[in-house]
Image: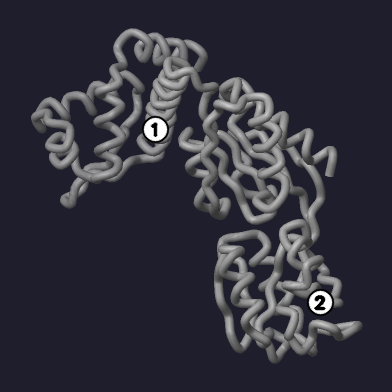
């Protein structure tokens, strides 16, 4: 097994060309060798030969041929994923060299979930900019289902937010920073806003703003509904936009929502939203940072990672 691995690595180091990997990724995207060849301006026979050479060098079948085109095998999907990562690293290297040429201090792309967006990440960015005023930081908001594939492919350097409970852990490092609890909130004019000792029965007549289906929090909430006599909200809005959710809650007396406590703390203190007096039997979990490894981070990326840890410790 070790001999086969060494043989394949030696071939890759001496024979593999970026043009082959580019073709591989394009075939995977199009599901068709002819379309990929046309996109990359090479002949179909040349494209077919490049794929065959890759299969010979890596000693696996990369695509299953069908009458509609080609479908990546598990080996093809793995090599396509690594190919995308290689191209992302080349792009990152070019960007870093360009930043250095123009006298800036690097570039970092940070993905953020709701739990990291209100306090932790902004404070960390402020801290980094104090030390590296010329660094460029790009922030992308989304769910783990959207952000994690982009982290693995190298498009994103770090993700800040609630750590996933069971998925998305392979090939990644995850550092817990603090424990976050989930708070049930409503607008200040909601009928339950000033009610003490709220029970689930009190909630039944109101609409809910729900986290997306693919999130751990949504699965926990769905189980909570099942445990309470298979409850279904009369109105359900699925949204991860805090600005949208806050406006919906403030403008309606008929909606309630789940929010990370740090996210809503300021709006609750200002009286824009009300924290409802009910303890949920789920939702407490670690907020942290996910990344591919410290050796994959640029100096600017390491500075962001350190700033996140420092801010979380101060919190």
Dot label at residue 245: none
Task: Decide: few, some or many residues near mark 1? Use Cα within 10 Å; few <14, some 14-19, many ≥20.
Answer: many
Q: Are marks 2 and 1 in contact (CB under 8 Å)?
A: no
Q: In the figure, is residue 97 to the left or right of 249?
A: left
Task: Decide: few, some or many residues near mark 2? Use Cα within 10 Å; few <14, some 14-19, many ≥20.
Answer: many
Residue at left offset 72%, top offset 45%: 120
Which colour style is shown? one colour
Dot label at residue 276: 2
Q: In the figure, is residue 1 to the left or right of 15?
A: right
Quote the CA–CA distance across marks 2 and 1: 46 Å
The quadrant in which residue 81 appears is: top left
| Mark closer to the observer (2, 1) | 2
The residue tagged with tag 1: helix, strand or loop? helix
Which percent across, then down, holds residue 122? 67, 44
Residue at left offset 84%, top offset 39%: 314
Pick whichever, 179 or 96, lies toward us.
96
Which percent across, then down, holds residue 18? 30, 21
Q: In the figure, is residue 227 to the left or right of 250?
A: right
Name the quarter where the C terminus is drawn.
Answer: top right
Read off the residue under disc 1.
84
The quadrant in which residue 255 appears is: bottom right
The residue tagged with tag 2: helix, strand or loop? loop
- Marks 2 and 1, the one that precedes in the sequence: 1
Which percent across, then down, holds residue 155? 46, 36
Residue lying at the far bottom of the rendered structure: 205
Residue 283 visible in the snapshot = no
């Amino acid at each position: 097994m070790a001999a086969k691995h060494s043989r394949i690595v030696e071939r890759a180091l001496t024979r593999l060309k970026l043009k082959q990997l580019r073709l591989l990724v394009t075939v995977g995207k199009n599901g068709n060798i002819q379309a990929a060849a046309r996109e990359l301006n090479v002949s179909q026979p040349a494209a077919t030969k490049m794929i065959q050479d890759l299969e010979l060098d890596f000693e696996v079948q990369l695509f299953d041929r069908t009458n509609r085109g080609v479908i990546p095998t598990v080996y093809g999907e793995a090599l396509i994923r690594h190919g995308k990562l290689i191209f992302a690293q080349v792009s990152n290297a070019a960007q870093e060299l360009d930043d250095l040429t123009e006298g800036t201090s690097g570039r970092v792309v940070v993905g953020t979930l709701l739990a990291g967006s209100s306090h932790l990440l902004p404070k960390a960015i402020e801290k980094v900019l104090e030390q590296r005023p010329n660094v460029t930081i790009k922030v992308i908001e989304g769910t783990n289902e959207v952000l994690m594939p982009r982290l693995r492919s190298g498009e994103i350097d770090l993700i800040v937010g609630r750590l996933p409970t069971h998925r998305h852990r392979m090939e990644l490092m995850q550092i817990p920073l603090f424990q976050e609890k989930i708070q049930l909130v409503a607008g200040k004019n909601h009928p339950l806003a000033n009610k003490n000792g709220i029970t689930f029965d009190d909630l039944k007549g109101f609409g809910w703003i729900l986290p997306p289906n693919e999130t751990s929090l949504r699965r926990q909430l769905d189980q909570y509904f099942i445990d309470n006599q298979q409850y279904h909200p009369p109105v359900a809005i699925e949204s991860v936009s805090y600005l949208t959710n806050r406006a919906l809650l403030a403008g309606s007396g008929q909606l309630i929502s789940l929010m990370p406590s740090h996210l809503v703390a300021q709006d609750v203190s200002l009286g824009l939203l009300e924290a409802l007096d009910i303890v949920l039997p789920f939702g407490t979990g670690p907020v942290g940072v996910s990344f591919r490894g410290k050796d994959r981070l640029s100096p600017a990326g390491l500075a962001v990672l350190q700033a996140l840890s420092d801010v979380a410790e101060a919190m």
